[in-house]
Amino acid sequence: MKNVFVLCFVLLSVLGFSQDRKEMGQNFVKAMFSEKEAEKAYTMFDGTIKDQLPLTDFKTVGSEITGQVGPFKKILEVNSEEDTYYFYSEFEKTSLDVQITFNSENKIVGFYFVPHKEFAAEPKK
């Protein structure tokens, strides 16, 4: 019985952990593009990213991306592989993945704008 309780606790922790990251990533994308609040998005970075990318430089990233792909419309789907999440996002001119990697403290340690990656559909039960 104790093993079942431990297994349930671990499973719920993992599911909650991934949901937190998914929500955090969505908030990051929305802060950058919908809300145009770079400061809010910047607070989600790990210190190593902040050391390499000052806030003043980061503030230009959102406008540079939208200058190339048009205004942000919505997140179409979210997929993940371990600590990396892919937020398939629709912009006016194209759709692409905003790839975000988290560390063990749920801080962003990497983000990229990449062509959409297809993931195998999970079997329906």
Image (cartoon, helix red, strand yellow):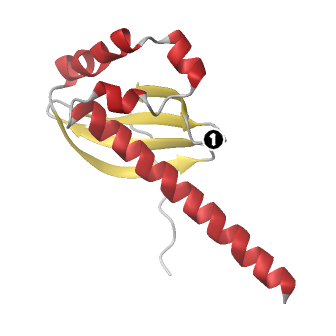
In this view, the residue in front, 86 or 110, is: 110
Point out the residue furthest to the bottom here: 1
Taking the image as shown, residue 2 lies to the left or right of residue 37, namely right
Is 72 situated above or below 110?
A: below
- The x and y percentages for residue 90 are 23, 40
**Residue drawn at the location 37% of the way across and 31% of the way down:** 41
Is 120 situated above or below 102?
A: below
Is 114 situated above or below 82?
A: above
**Residue drawn at the location 50% of the way across and 58% of the way down:** 19
Say whether residue 33 is visible.
yes
**Residue drawn at the location 34% of the way across and 32% of the way down:** 40
Is 52 situated above or below 33?
A: above
- The x and y percentages for residue 118 are 44, 46
Quarter residue 14 falls in: bottom right
Say whether residue 114 is visible.
no
**Residue drawn at the location 34% of the way across and 10% of the way down:** 56
Report helix, strand or loop for mark 1: loop
- The x and y percentages for residue 89 are 29, 41
Q: Which residue position holds label 1?
A: 105
Say which quadrant the N terminus sits in: bottom right
In this view, the residue in front, 31 or 61, is: 31
Categorize mark 1 by other alpha carbons within 10 Å: few (<14), some (14-19), many (20+): few
- The x and y percentages for residue 103 are 63, 37
